Image (cartoon, rainbow, N blue to C red):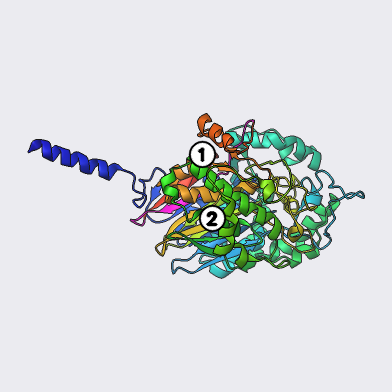
Amino acid sequence: MFKITTACLLFFFVIACKQNPHKPANPTGLVTKKAMVVAAREEAASIGAAVIKKGGNAFDAMVATEMALAVAYPFAGNLGGGGFMVYRKNDGSVGALDYREKAPLAAHKNMYLDSLGNVVPEMSTVGATAVGVPGTVAGVMAVHKKFGKLPLEQILSPVIALANKGVIVTEKQAKRLDNSREKFISVNGDSTKFAQVYYKGDTIKYPALANTLNTIMLQGKDGFYKGEIAKKLADFIQEKGGFITEEDLAKYEAQWRNPVIFNYKDLKIISMSPPSSGGITMQQIFKMMEPFDVASFGHNSEKTIQLFTESARRAYADRNYFLGDPDFVTIPTNKLTSDSYLTERMKTFSFDSATASDDIAHGAIEIIESNETTHYSIVDAEGNAVSVTTTLNGAYGSKLYSDELGFFLNNEMDDFSSKPGVPNMFGLIGAEANSIAPEKRMLSSMTPTIVEKEGQLYMVVGTPGGSTIITAVAQTILNVYEFNLSMQDAVNAPRFHHQWLPDLIMFEEEGFTQELKTNLKEKGYKLREGKNPIIGKVDAIRILPNGQLEGGADKRGDDTAVGF
Ligand code: DON
């Protein structure tokens, strides 16, 4: 009798312990009951969470977190850049905001080409010529106007206080500043703030930025895009040889857009629409994978990597050709995302061997990736969710820094296709759809995303990483949904990337065996050799079945989850 009971218990124990993809994994990240902000710096996440605690909603917290990142994380947080927000309110309504930079009025298709038609090195990446019309302040003000609950003063005062008090330099930040110091000096001269060497533990104060933020707090959008700040900014950029005028600034408006919405199995995924490629490209990847029993292949297994890679290869080929600013080009979205088209695209896929990217289209290019954008995820005490990715493009953008106004300017113009077939800094080659035109927005890969399951909020997720953003977001969602990882484990898990061209799989250094790589090579996959960098820095929130929130703050950076 005793033996039978023990055997029964053992049987049930084994069954209970067996990973069940429908039973959510236990959390391994911070868990809170009501609200959470996950961002690249603890200071920014804390200010965002504090705004919610004093009665603000996720949109107030968005304004606070975005501005606090401009203070605490000037590497990517910004007043001189742009971004995208996807939201889901607690009544289930969703939307998106595009505050992407625009080409200035003086821009034209061949502005980065010399008289022989060659791309001028660094003209779209370094210094004033690289700067697009900044969108961030217009973005946060549009959010506050439409959805804000607290007055701007309550939201921005703690940010201004942080700028005045200063931010302590982390080890990673000291390294990043050091890597760019020479460029700061060559672009701005040796009296610029960041010509100085900063060490871990130093405090950097930002009085000029505090003044600029104060004007924005008192005067709103116009305080930045018109009047004294606009004049100083336009004069400064032009003095340095750039194109942006006061008229460009005065004309800038953020755009409310309909997000991309699609189902993957029983998930509903809400992500960014053009001018970001994020949503459509991720939709294509997921839809090509959907017919397969992905969970049964195993996390980061050979089959999973093959299926994901082949879907990404096909999706990125379309991205580079068809996508651009929807205010300027017609994107065949319905066709690109239709089942019949995607089934046709996957007809050449087999687990036996790799498809060559040359069989899909032509080209041979270098891939250069980095993590110079930043993403933050917010859920408030009322269940509203906000997912935001914001950037200066490269590290500290164009490196052009206004000492007078206290912020860096973007080098987003490089996200346009300067010349068809010539890759940008992420190795992405572009086509006519993403060519330069006055007031056009450059194509992006930023993929702020919100996921619903069974009609309920399930995840808020996004990442930096240039062209690797889309694959990193997709893998994080799959890690939770298909492979039953907790939010924090899903964020920590090793990632890989393929973007059609160059025809290479890139693996993060840790977490993939030699045997797996050898097997893939035998099937015809080419792997990127040499030391590979990290892929993305994902900041995400998972909503647990009991309604609590689990943070996933990427261990690859100083990223932190804060909540209550
Ligand atoms: O919008 C884009 O796709 C790029 N400007 C993002 C840049 C980025 O993620 C830089 N960090 N890796």
Q: CA–CA distance between discs 2 and 1?
A: 22 Å
Quadrant in the picture for residue 329: bottom right
Quick one: SS at disc 2? helix
Do we see residue 307 in this rendering? yes
Q: Residue at x 89, y 49 (%)?
A: 114
439 vs 514: above or below: below
- According to the image, label 2 marks what residue? 288
Residue matched to label 1 = 494
Q: Is residue 348 left or right of residue 443?
A: left
Circle 1: element type: loop
> How many other residues sit within 10 Å of disc 2, few (<14), some (14-19) or many (≥20)?
many
The N terminus lies in quadrant:
top left
Magenta stretch, main secondary structure, is: loop
For residue 315, side relative to residue 435 (left or right): left
* Magenta residue span: 530-547
Residue at the image point whose x is 79% and y is 53% from the top: 420
